Amino acid sequence: MALPRIQTNILNNLVHSGKLSADQANQLFQSDADMSGNNLDKVLLEELKVAPLQLLVAKAQAYELPPFNLRAHRLSDRTFEHVDRDFCKEHGIIPISVLGDHLLIATSDPFNLGVVSKIQDSTRLRVTAMLALDSEIQALLAEKDQTPVAVGFSDVMDSLQREFGPGQEELDVNDMDLEEESAPIVQLASRIIEEAYYAGGSDIHIEPFENEARVRVRVDGVCLEKLRIPPKVCVSLLARLKVMANLDIAEKRIPQDGRIVYKQFNKKGIDVDLRVATAPLNHGEGVVMRILDKQKSTLPLTALGFSEDNLTIYRNLIQRPYGMILHCGPTGSGKSMTLYSALNEINTPRCLYPHRGGSY
């Protein structure tokens, strides 16, 4: 039984990348078994032990769609904000992210154009599809609806009030206070980061003043005030953030730069990094943290809002073996997103640096 064109291309891609031998592919070409739908996937994954990610890349090349590895993706409270969860279960899709007027979805059936049309009609957004394995889509959709939600600061502030309140003596916060998960100051640092993440923030600003410190979060380019804390709480909060960023907590007179890998400090599946910059100010030390959400940094270039002409020019530029491309713009304009998307497009298993007609 002759295989359909798409299945034939998938096998050829696996052979070309060295993930499948020519003999194994020929056996499948000559097999009388039904290889339509997910049957070919089952044979490749279960019998021939092809890795899921290798199969995904081969299928994406056959469908001419960007691949999306759902194993690294986590559902959030905003996953089903635009597309209902029941609709996603019915049609086997996962909403990934919204960027401008584009909605990015993961699907295992790119030929189901009716689903894309329904989503565009209901959301008024332009839908960009990425290819994912059906097994991974179903596994995510089967997860219980326990997505985290913002809970505010009232409980942790009550604990801090008892520990740092006006009636309390000045406390010398030791290393144990900065490491113990149940400590109020540790909970406050984590809560600030999580609240900013759930709000879709790009930056966190902690600014000391004479009688209080202010915590602000930048959302869609606008800084919104989230919290006011006493100065002595701010000192302990800065110390905790420095510990998380591997900075010197004793040095307060010069600026410091570091990085927080927040996945190490939470059990909620929040996989973000934060660029941390501290600096001495008039009334103490301040900090700015830039949130880098790794789950949103791999959108395809077609989802970034380029015009067709500019997209063609940009794609030609990133394929060149040397030179420089400058990404310029204000905070939140998409510089890092564009860079990650460009790197993701040229970083293919077949040819990492595609030039001079060859590969490395």
Image (cartoon, helix red, strand yellow):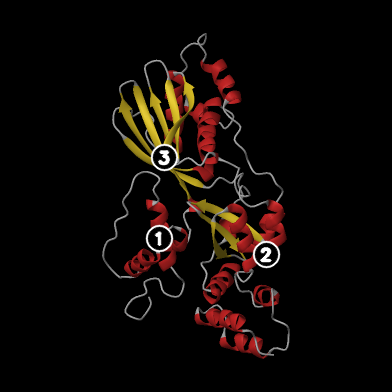
- What is the three-letter code of the residue carrying label 2? Ser
- What is the three-letter code of the residue carrying label 3? Gly
Query: What residue lies at 42% left-to-right and 57% top-to-bottom?
Result: 340
Q: Secondary structure at mark 1?
A: loop
**Residue 1 or 279: which is nearer the viewer?**
1
Instruction: Check residue 306 in the rendering and tell me which mark sits there, or answer none.
Output: 1
Can you tell which quarter of the image residue 313 is in?
A: bottom left
N-term mark: 3 or 1: 3
Badge 3 is on which residue? 221
Residue 301 at what x, y percent from top left? 44, 62
- Circle 2 Cα neighbour tier, 10 Å, few/some/many (<14 / 14–19 / ≥20): some
Q: Secondary structure at mark 2?
A: helix
Query: What residue lies at 45% left-to-right and 25% top-to-bottom?
Result: 236
**Residue 272 or 86: which is nearer the viewer?**
86
Badge 2 is on which residue? 135
Residue 321 at what x, y percent from top left? 30, 70
- Circle 3 Cα neighbour tier, 10 Å, few/some/many (<14 / 14–19 / ≥20): some
